[in-house]
């Protein structure tokens, strides 16, 4: 690796980048307390309100990780409208915006990239008014070095104030957070990872984007299907964020989430570190239970 403060660990072809390997794994299960809304618009407004609360509570920059897919589209529409209206220009000028995961290798202009989807919904005015936008670079032969550059910038800015996060269904009624996959070996000190991709992930990703209204060309879809990896922020980035705001709004189009979310809601993490690591590795959706300041905004169709 090039000159870097990050070290790498590899497990089953999953590469994890870590700042420090701490052997002490402090387990405090804070549980999950969902706030149930009736419409996606209400979820979007609740997410925006969390940004307003952070803006009031601190001075200077605000560092956020955007959530891709359906979960935050209403938030992004609201932010786009604010950017167009000029109502919150002072707030927007404080935002350092990061993406949290990406398919790679893939051209940054691909319509199936989260970056293009963000641009489509947030709009040009938003990107002109924020302080900075840092996506994960996916069009390079050296994904590790590019990911380290991204992590270095995030670290230099002081880490995430808000990690906007979703909940993705996985086989065996498990789930992923960001794109931390089951049995990918993610541990509490891993800041980010490069994970081999599966066809099921690609199908889920493409169908999710199409359902969300993305216009996808045949060549974009072909390139997307040739992606080999997922870049993702890891457990350390989640646990070290000052606030985690989860949204789950698409149980109608992704009904598996009804059971996979219920499993996260109802599974107590063991106080035995080895057992806890096994639970978290098998069902990474559980990582949210270890964050002391996590909100979970869901629609009533999730059945909780």
Image (spheres, rainbow, N blue to C red):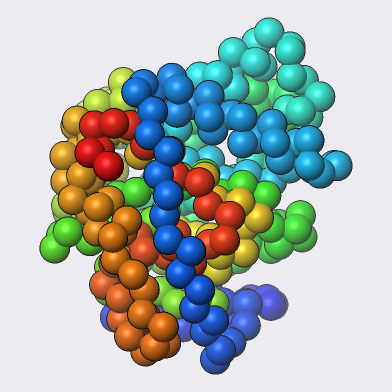
As drawn, the residue found furthest toward the top would be 85
Position above or below: 151 against 43: below
Position above or below: 207 against 123: below
Who is closer to the viewer here, 42 or 3?
Answer: 42
State the image quarter where residue 255 is shown.
top left
Percent x, y of residue 111: 37, 30
Percent x, y of residue 293: 58, 55
Q: In this rendering, does residue 2 appear at all?
A: yes
Q: Is residue 298 left or right of residue 240?
A: left
**Quadrant of image for the C terminus:** top left
Residue depicted at x 66% and y 17%? 83
Residue depicted at x 61% and y 30%? 49
Percent x, y of residue 163: 56, 49
Q: Is residue 59 left or right of residue 71?
A: right
Q: How many marks?
A: 0
Q: In this rendering, does residue 234 appear at all?
A: no
As drawn, the residue found furthest toward the right would be 59
Who is closer to the viewer here, 256 or 207?
Answer: 256
Who is closer to the viewer here, 19 or 31?
Answer: 31
**Quadrant of image for the N terminus:** bottom right
Position above or below: 88 against 203: above
Position above or below: 146 against 5: above
Percent x, y of residue 297: 43, 38
State the image quarter where residue 58 is shown.
top right
Residue depicted at x 36% and y 21%? 39
Residue depicted at x 43% and y 38%? 35
Q: Is residue 18 left or right of residue 250?
A: right
């Amino acid at each position: 690796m090039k000159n870097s403060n990050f070290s790498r660990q590899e497990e089953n072809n999953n590469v994890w980048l870590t700042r420090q390997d701490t052997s002490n794994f402090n387990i405090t299960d804070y549980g999950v307390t969902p706030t149930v809304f009736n419409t996606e618009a209400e979820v979007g407004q609740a997410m925006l309100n969390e940004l307003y609360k952070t803006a009031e509570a601190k001075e200077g920059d605000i560092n956020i990780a955007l959530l891709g897919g359906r979960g935050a589209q209403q938030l992004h529409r609201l932010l786009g409208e604010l950017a167009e209206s000029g109502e919150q220009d002072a707030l927007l000028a404080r935002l350092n915006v990061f993406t949290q995961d990406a398919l790679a290798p893939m051209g940054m202009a691909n319509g199936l990239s989260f970056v293009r989807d963000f641009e489509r919904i947030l709009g040009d005015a938003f990107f002109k008014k924020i302080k900075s936008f840092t996506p994960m670079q996916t069009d390079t032969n050296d994904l590790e070095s590019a990911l380290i550059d991204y992590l270095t910038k995030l670290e230099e800015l002081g880490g995430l104030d808000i990690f906007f996060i979703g909940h993705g269904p996985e086989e065996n009624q498990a789930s992923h957070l960001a794109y931390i996959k089951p049995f990918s070996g993610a541990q509490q000190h891993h800041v980010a990872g490069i994970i081999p991709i599966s066809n099921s992930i690609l199908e889920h990703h493409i169908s999710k984007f199409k359902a969300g209204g993305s216009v996808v060309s045949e060549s974009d879809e072909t390139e997307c299907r040739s992606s080999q990896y997922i870049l993702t922020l890891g457990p350390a980035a989640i646990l070290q964020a000052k606030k985690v705001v989860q949204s789950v709004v698409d149980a109608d189009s992704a009904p598996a989430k009804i059971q996979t979310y219920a499993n996260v809601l109802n599974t107590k993490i063991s106080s035995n570190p080895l057992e806890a690591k096994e639970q978290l590795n098998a069902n990474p959706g559980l990582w949210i239970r270890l964050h002391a300041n996590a909100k979970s905004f869901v629609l009533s169709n999730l059945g909780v």
